[in-house]
Amino acid sequence: MRRKQHRFQHNREAHNVIERGKPLYTTIKGQWHEYFKNNNSLVLELACGKGEYTVGLAENRPDVNIIGIDIKGDRIARGSKRCIEKGLENAAFLRTGIQFLEEFFEESSIEEIWLIHPDPQPRDKEEKRRLTNDHFLAEYKKYLKPGGKFILKTDSPFLYEYTLEKLSDDADFKIMGNTNDLYNSPLLEDHYGIKTHYEGLWMEKGYTINYIKCQLKN
């Protein structure tokens, strides 16, 4: 509990965390380029957890602005701290639920959306919570620019197949590449060599990583 309290305190003070109670929380919509002090493209990592991918993308792509989004404050505090330690000013963390994207982003303003190892929610009654169901895909389309990309990386064969079917049936998306074994695929360079902690543990057990990259049609 004490560690969580320290992380919550960090979030309240950190310049790269936007959360309820801070002025930017209600004014950031349409102001992201002013916040980052540049006109670089915006990239989102949804359900970013500890921010491992947000940090990795910011390191590998200094020419874009990365925003990690998660509702868990004790998680994003870890990513925030790493970015501060590394001097990464092209990354920020937004503490909110994915269902509230409209409060923070204008339509057709996002270049890429990354979804890294989300909970697959495999039971039938959980479909409404899957982050690649029809409802969420429709939301992502609202915020992606024409030609913008949506990327899923998952250790769940179920979610991979489910999402692949959804995207194949969606006339607005074009699948640019997919594989059920990323680390033995020509698509490997796509993910910039970023491997989360649990992804490494999963692979040590002999499991493969699934990957889909698609593009919103113009």
Image (cartoon, helix red, strand yellow):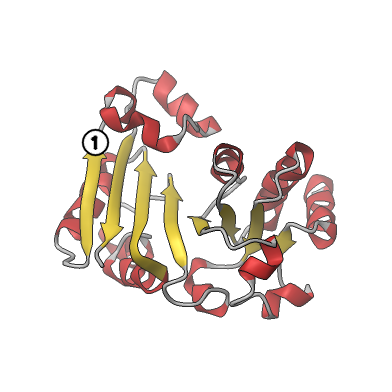
Q: Which percent across, then down, holds residue 56?
A: 57, 38
The residue located at (38%, 60%) in the rendering is 131
Mark 1, Cα crowd under 10 Å, few <14 / some 14-19 / many 20+, is some
Please determine whether, in this image, residue 187 is positioned above or below residue 54. Answer: above
Q: Is residue 21 visible?
A: no
Q: Which percent across, then down, holds residue 215?
A: 28, 57
Q: Amino acid at mark 1?
A: Thr
The residue located at (60%, 46%) in the rendering is 51
Q: As drawn, is 92 to the left or to the right of 132?
A: right
Quarter in which the C terminus is drawn: bottom left
Residue 144, quarter of the rendered image:
bottom left
Q: Which percent across, then down, holds residue 13?
A: 85, 59
User: Which of the pair 143/130 is nearer the observer?
Assistant: 143
The residue located at (69%, 80%) in the rendering is 27
Residue 24, quarter of the rendered image:
bottom right
Please determine whether, in this image, residue 123 is positioned above or below residue 81. Answer: below
Q: Is residue 97 visible?
A: yes
Q: Which percent across, then down, holds residue 147?
A: 32, 61
User: Which of the pair 144/98 is nearer the observer?
Assistant: 144
Residue placed furthest toward the front = 39
> Total of numbered circles in the picture?
1
* Location of mark 1 (residue): 179
User: Which of the pair 188/94 is nearer the observer?
Assistant: 188
Q: As drawn, is 96 to the left or to the right of 77?
A: left
Please determine whether, in this image, residue 104 is positioned above or below residue 57. Answer: below
Please determine whether, in this image, residue 183 is positioned above or below residue 210. Answer: above
Q: As drawn, is 190 to the left or to the right of 58?
A: left
Secondary structure under tag 1 reads strand
The residue located at (21%, 47%) in the rendering is 161
User: Which of the pair 12/147 is nearer the observer?
Assistant: 147
Residue 96, quarter of the rendered image:
bottom right
